[in-house]
Amino acid sequence: MSSADDDIPFFGDDDPAPRAQPAAGGGSIAARAMAARNASRPTPNYLSGLNPEQADAVESIEGPVLVLAGAGTGKTRVLTTRIAHILNLGLAYPSQILSVTFTNKAAREMKERIGVLVGGAVEGMPWLGTFHSIGVKLLRRHAELANLRSDFTILDTDDVVRLCKQLIQAEGIDDKRWPARQFAQMIDGWKNKGLGPAEIPEGDSRGFANGKGRALYTAYQARLQTLNAVDFGDLLCQPIRLFRANPDVLKEYQQKFRFILVDEYQDTNTAQYMWLRLLAQRPAPERPNICCVGDDDQSIYGWRGAEVENILRFDKDFPGAKVIRLERNYRSTEHILGAAGHLISHNEGRLGKTLFTEQSNPEHERVHVHAAWDSEEEARAIGEEIEQAQNKGRALNNMAILVRASFQMREFEERFVTLGLNYRVIGGPRFYERQEIRDAMAFFRVVSQPADDLAFERIVNVPKRGLGEAAVRQIHDAARARGIPMLAAARDLILTDELKPRPRKSLTDVVEMFTRWQTLMETAPGHELAETILEESGYTEMWQNDRAADAPTRLENLKELVETISGFESLRAFLEHVALVMDTDNNPDLDAVSIMTLHSAKGLEFETVFLPGWEEGLFPHQRALDEGGRSGLEEERRLAYVGLTRAKLFCHIWFVSNRRIHGLWQSTLPSRFLDELPEAHVEVAEMDTGYGGYGRGGSFGGQSGGPYGASRFDRAEPFSGTYNTPGWKRAQANKTDAARDNWGTRSGHAVERIAYGESGPRGSTIEGELVAKSTGTTSAYSVGDRVFHMKFGNGNIAVIDGNKLTIDFDKAGQKRVLDGFVSRVGT
DNA sequence: CTAAATGATATTTTT
DNA sequence: TATCATTTAG
């Protein structure tokens, strides 16, 4: 959210029609819309490309509307066109449209697309954003009504956990037995439901730390108050509370927001629902112009508080709501839609949609189901398929591997590294969650918000200054005793002789530094200030002196951070941005296969999709089954549905007979979802390897088909257990084939780790060349050279065998690697 | 303060 | 089995 949004005056001159004659007033809108449309203009061109259902969804502007938008049916298009339509008809100014999404990415995309539609004439929409960013905006404006100062800090999960830990320990509770992490999750859960400390169920309170749940929650909220901080949950709950306590304020917003649009409605939690309800409330005869778009079949976030019920209940919540179904799919082939549709039909309690396509694609393949002996073969075979597709001229960017759990990614990464296949991992720990970034941010936070004790505590002793636990405790106690922030307490404490001389000196330095930086903040531009802070604090130096393998990367990250800051007005503006916008962008120039979880694939599409790991226990995940029962299974099934519907042309599902879980090998059963796919749209790919077989009959008492009934994936012959099977031999042969096919076709290998905001050895040596060059000749390295490997860190070369190096790694021990994957380290 | 040892824990993730 | 965080010992 750019800070410019905040500059738009609140109830200022941006409001058009006088409120005495509200546009939302019963019945006038449709009439005016029609009049406006019929009057002069023909069908505006932005409407012309829509299909009838989409057009209906765009033009049904008055009253509550639920758009059930199946996967690939043009949901975002409807949403953006609808906004353009409202603006075009002059029914509202941009500032009178409230439009909420779940992710910043979605919000950004919508802003861009609206900009295109309305020709950029409209200043960005100030109230288009995530629930959270809009929550912040509301809360900053009315901070005093929530007993906060408007410069409050937004704590992230890490801060929250540390805070909880402090509270738990302060209560004298064993934080081993009652982990802070768990408590933080409980708080999050309560806030997702919009519950304050007084409202939580008695059982919940009693369930934690021998009945101290409620007391801890109360203490937690009090602590946030004194820290002038909020957590993510508060960004939803505080506005709700504020609206309820101040009907006049609520009324202003109700009148302001003439149109409300909600994206991904199936993902809303109870708090978000309450928030929307409040804003959408209208006096008796009037009806809110609320349009919610979503797909109950794609609800996959139940485990973090999303209530599918919200979407299922929509027409009861908003009587007379118009429900529009978008079932015309523009993404996938008939086979893919057929497979996905049949699978999802096994769920109960759906609103019911059937996707269809009118485009008949010449490349019309069934969904392929493949079996592999174990996850290694699975990775190898998928790697092969990818290479074959690539040889046919298909771009890696159009391919994705979607896994159920992130541990599955590793095997693919390893395989692709050896193949020299570019890949990109999406998801995982984010740039702003990295230690060095969080440390740097903590410095900045203390400078801009001296009451931010959590940040202060994080970095008083970073780099190590001899301010150990004892000293910090002392500052903490002094601060708590007098009800002042720790930095202020430290300032006083150094004037006394309560501290030992050494810590006292260090602390004096720290306090002086912060004082200096605070003065500097008034004048220096953000990025300069940031650089100064990192330099003077000794933080940069600390990493420069660090000999660890990842220290250079960390320095790079810090540099990147400072660069990012230079794009902001001030350090403050930057901090605000970071608290909410945690995503990092990718490098679309690089052609690479995407590897991600099914969850993070929602909303994306690829020409070819690989879905590995369709085994009982993994997918559906055992834990979902154990903890969620039938609804857990249904959510897993929706996840499978999401996976299938990501594919435009080709979809390959894989399952293995053996998978290593927590270190030990387990034989696995094919996922029940495989049996829920329709024969007509599925092709079972070469099962002649025997790898798909396993001794099912034995372990299930001879019951044919195992516990889920007869399966077409049952094998008659049990696995032979030797490496003499045709499949094994084939696998061996393929190994070399694949490598040979590779030579000369590869154009360097690159790995991108999007969330980390770092990239691998881009443009490194061509594998083919290496192999050719290395035959008989010497490698570019010599024994004893100090080298760096992206996976194993630093090490010294022990043996050179052509392009293969044996390296003694400092951390990882001795490994044999290709020299294309190491780089020389300057000594 | 650092390094080694121990032990818990091992879906999915955004804000 | 591997990784992580935290504790413990030096």
Image (cartoon, coloured by chain):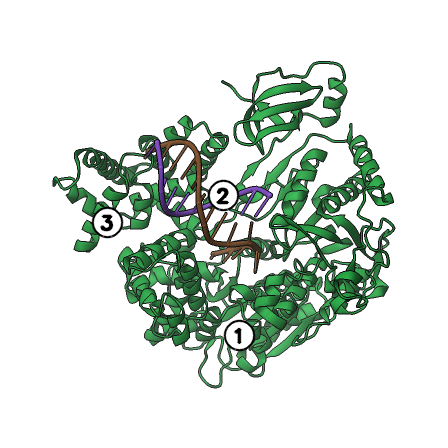
Chain colours: A green, B brown, C purple
Which amino acid lies under the numbered mark 2 shown in the image of this protein? Phe
Residue A406 falls left or right of residue A436: right
Classify mark 3: residues with Cα within 10 Å, few (<14), some (14-19) or many (20+): some
Q: Position of residue A780 (x, y in %)?
A: 65, 16
Which amino acid lies under the numbered mark 1 shown in the image of this protein? Asn
Q: Residue A476, which numbered label?
A: 3
Classify mark 2: residues with Cα within 10 Å, few (<14), some (14-19) or many (20+): many
Q: Position of residue A690 (x, y in %)?
A: 84, 51
Labels 3 and 2 within one chain:
yes
Residue at image x 49%, y 66%? A97
Classify mark 1: residues with Cα within 10 Å, few (<14), some (14-19) or many (20+): many
Relative depth, front residue between A245 and A1:
A245
Relative depth, front residue between A257 and A147:
A147
Pointer 2 chain: A
Relative depth, front residue between A632 and A642:
A632
Relative depth, front residue between A343 and A448:
A343
Q: Which residue is mark 2?
A: A431
Residue A483, image quadrant: bottom left
CA separation in Å, label 3 and label 1 = 51 Å
Which of the two discs, 3 and 1, labels the residue nearer the N terminus?
Answer: 1
Residue A521, image quadrant: top left
